[in-house]
Image: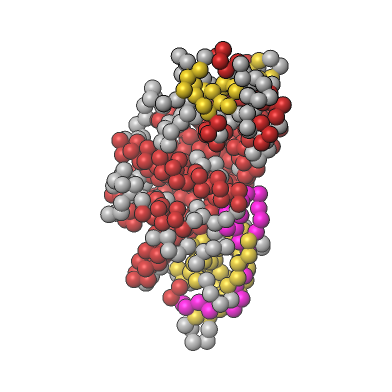
Amino acid sequence: MSKTFTRAEVAKHNTEDSLWFVIDSKVYDVTDFVDAHPGGESVLRQVAGQDATVAFYNLHRHEVLSKYEDLRIGTLEGEKPQVVTPKPGDLSTVPYAEPLWLTPVYKSPYYNDSHRRLQKAMRIFVDTYITPEAQAREADGKRISQELVDRMSEKGLLHMRLGPGKHLHGVNLLDGAVKGEEFDYFHDLIMAQEGVRANARGFQDGQLAGMVIGLPCVMNYMKDQQRKKAIMDEVFSGKKYMCLAITEAFAGSDVAGLRTTATKTPDGKHYIVNGTKKWITNGVFCDYFITGVRTDKGLSVLIIERGEGVETKPIKTSYSTAAGTAYITFDNVKVPVENLLGEENKGIYVILANFNHERWAMACATIRQCRVIVEECLKWSHQRLVFGKRLIEQPVIRQKLAKMIALVEANQSWLETITYQMNQMPYRQQARHLGGPVGLLKMSITRAAHEIADEAVQIFGGRGLTQSGMGRVVEMFNRTYKFDAILGGSEEVLADLGVRQAMKQMPNAKL
């Protein structure tokens, strides 16, 4: 049983030989820790024998206390902790830290009990298994562990990340949180949003994002059904990894500008592939490359296995090398013609087929990351003391928070509206009617991320530029939010797509 002390007893321990203090009613003995304190010993001696709660939270994140739990010797008599310590799976009680549908007082027509079960199960899984590894790998740059991939496969996470479909039927999805047959795009939205709460942007993409954008090409366009099933089984089981290799130094959003070539051999049984690909997510460690190539009369897509003539090199970008971002060289790579996905010279349809879902999923993730930043800023502005008062008492700070909250809530609402349309439309209608709206949505959300990152750094000051400590979450977001403004189609390209698609429906209307 934990010992209890009075404040008077704690106050006596303020000497060189005995240094105690209180944080949130818990008593800590740091006598033997003084010399090891990263911030120096004087900071600790200034609060010796005192209640250091305010001083501590002005300098440290709450999570630091768990790191030094062995220094806690008891609690204050008759007092209880006031600071919330979240457990795995808990919802945040900070205003606007959760989407409105997860806030008890609000209702939504979009979500039912199966959505709530999935959200709860996914949050527990992320908090327990993904977040600890995500933080470690973001720091050391190593790829995702096979242990975590196996666990994700076992619980159906890899299957669910590809959205609704027959591939989910009969699969164990987080121990029955939802049935594969009832999995819809709101379940998909939940998976995307809960999955990014670990706040490790490089690891987020290293968490098999290449599979998410590459495997649908195989599922929808591979003609050999037996081989298709074999590849799907390998990838869904986590035994093999896959990436989508379209972008080149010569062609990004301009897919038609690809220069990698695939020339048929005289006997017509193989393609010989030559060329390079750049900025390919997961390319460093993947086994299958879904590759855009130029054939004799147009673009085609091949599935190329890692082997002779395939070389990958890591590319260092703004986020962690845990993403496995690669520069790929194909040097006279021999590929069986059976590895053609879709029709020869009509690969543009294969490439475009998954764009809506990819962009929509990125929009889901980005707006959830924005919400995490809102929560960070709300917490910080309530605990940070400047000029003798809390930041939240400054009108200019409240104005910044209001702007951030409004951007998050408006875009989440638009996201849910489009998600509802996805549930009501078969694939062909989605392709026809939602390409423009999804493009505009992603553009709007990444523009919001730009504004939110800017305001968050101003609120956190120098800490918002520091990769550790109080501002580490804001620093990560500010350094990496631009990935979502570029990947999957740049803001400018998607904005133009949205307006051009709308113009196709424009009547002969006059002012």
302 is within the stretch colored magenta? no
Of residues 290 and 103, the one nearer the viewer is: 103
Quarter assignment of residue 470: top right
Q: How is the image coloured?
A: secondary structure
335 is higher (above) or lower (below) than 315:
below
- Residue 160 position in % (x across, y down): 38, 50
Residue at x-position 68% and y-position 24%: 16
Magenta region: which residues?
A: 315-337
- Total numbered badges shown on the rendered structure: 0
Of residues 389 and 296, the one nearer the viewer is: 389
Residue at x-position 36% and y-position 26%: 107
- Residue 29 position in % (x across, y down): 58, 27
187 is higher (above) or lower (below) than 61:
below
- Residue 155 position in % (x across, y down): 36, 51
Q: Is residue 92 visible?
A: yes
324 is within the stretch colored magenta? yes
Location of the C terminus by quadrant is top right
219 is higher (above) or lower (below) than 450:
below
Residue at x-position 56% and y-position 26%: 28
Quarter assignment of residue 119: top left
- Residue 104 position in % (x across, y down): 38, 25
Residue at x-position 31% and y-position 47%: 175
Q: Residue furthest top?
A: 8
245 is higher (above) or lower (below) than 439:
below
Location of the N terminus by quadrant is top left
Of residues 212 and 176, the one nearer the viewer is: 176
Q: Is residue 82 visible?
A: no
